[in-house]
Image (cartoon, rainbow, N blue to C red):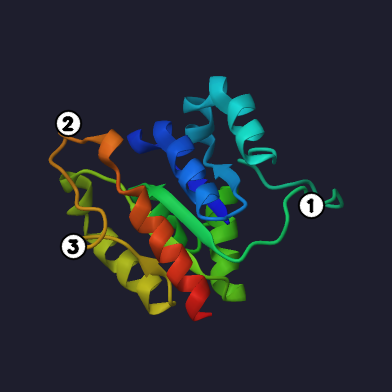
Amino acid sequence: MYLFGCASPPVVHIDRAIRDAQARGWQVCLGLTPSAREWLEDRLPELEELTGHPVRSAYRFYGRPETWPRTDVVVVAPATLHTVNACALGITSTFVVGFAAEAMGKRIPLVVMPCLNSTYARHPQFERSLEVLRGEGVRVLYGPGGFVPNPPGQGRPEEYPWHLALDAAHEAVRRR
């Protein structure tokens, strides 16, 4: 499993998702957006030890060998407004979005669980982006049965429903 985290407060608890995924039998490779990487900078060695793989946040240089094994599924969680919109629009300026776009093209199962406040969720592009992703076969966990946004400043990052993303990843691979 490739687990990609964005700069949203639950990312500080991404080790919980990694441990849960590993307990479910997944080998996990962790990718972070550049901002999420900054948030977790002090914990990168711990996260690399936990996964057994380097944490990636940038494209590898052309001609260099791949350091991660192939994946059966990609999970983008927590996914910010920016990442959701960039994925839907094909704006691949970051490794996380670029690989998500590639996963769609290669038909690698892709699960996206946003994490944004209710103000961001009202942006008109957000709903269009969710429709585009769902139309491409991406499992989007938003609303009932997924992430439900809170008003600004009332988030509970420690309660982010990582288990829903992992359940969806298992289901996506099983259906494949």
Nearer to us in this view, 17 or 94: 17
Q: Which residue is mark 1?
A: 66
Circle 3 — which element? loop
Q: Residues within 10 Å of mark 2 (few under 14, many from 20)?
A: few
Q: Residues within 10 Å of mark 1 (few under 14, many from 20)?
A: few
Q: Which residue is depicted at the point 62% across and 74% down?
A: 106
- Mark nearer the viewer, 2 or 3: 3
Quarter the N terminus occupies: bottom right
| Residue type, label 1 | Glu
Q: Can see residue 8?
A: no
Which mark is first along the chain, 3 or 1?
Answer: 1
| Residue type, label 2 | Gly
Is residue 142 positioned above or below 81 on the image? below
Which mark is first along the chain, 3 or 2?
Answer: 3
Is residue 35 positioned above or below 75 on the image? above
- Cα–Cα gap, marks 2 and 3: 21 Å
Q: Which mark is residue 144?
A: 3
Query: Could you say which quadrant of the image residue 54 lies in?
Result: top right
Circle 1 — which element? loop
Residue 32 at what x, y percent from top left? 54, 41
Is residue 70 positioned above or below 172 on the image? above
Tell me: 84 left or right of 120. right
Query: Could you say which quadrant of the image residue 140 lies in?
Result: bottom left
Residue 45 at what x, y percent from top left? 64, 25
Tell me: 62 left or right of 138. right
Is residue 70 positioned above or below 94 on the image? below
- Cα–Cα gap, marks 1 and 2: 40 Å
Query: Could you say which quadrant of the image residue 25 lies in?
Result: bottom right
Q: Which mark is residue 153?
A: 2
| Residue type, label 3 | Pro
Residue 15 at what x, y percent from top left? 48, 36
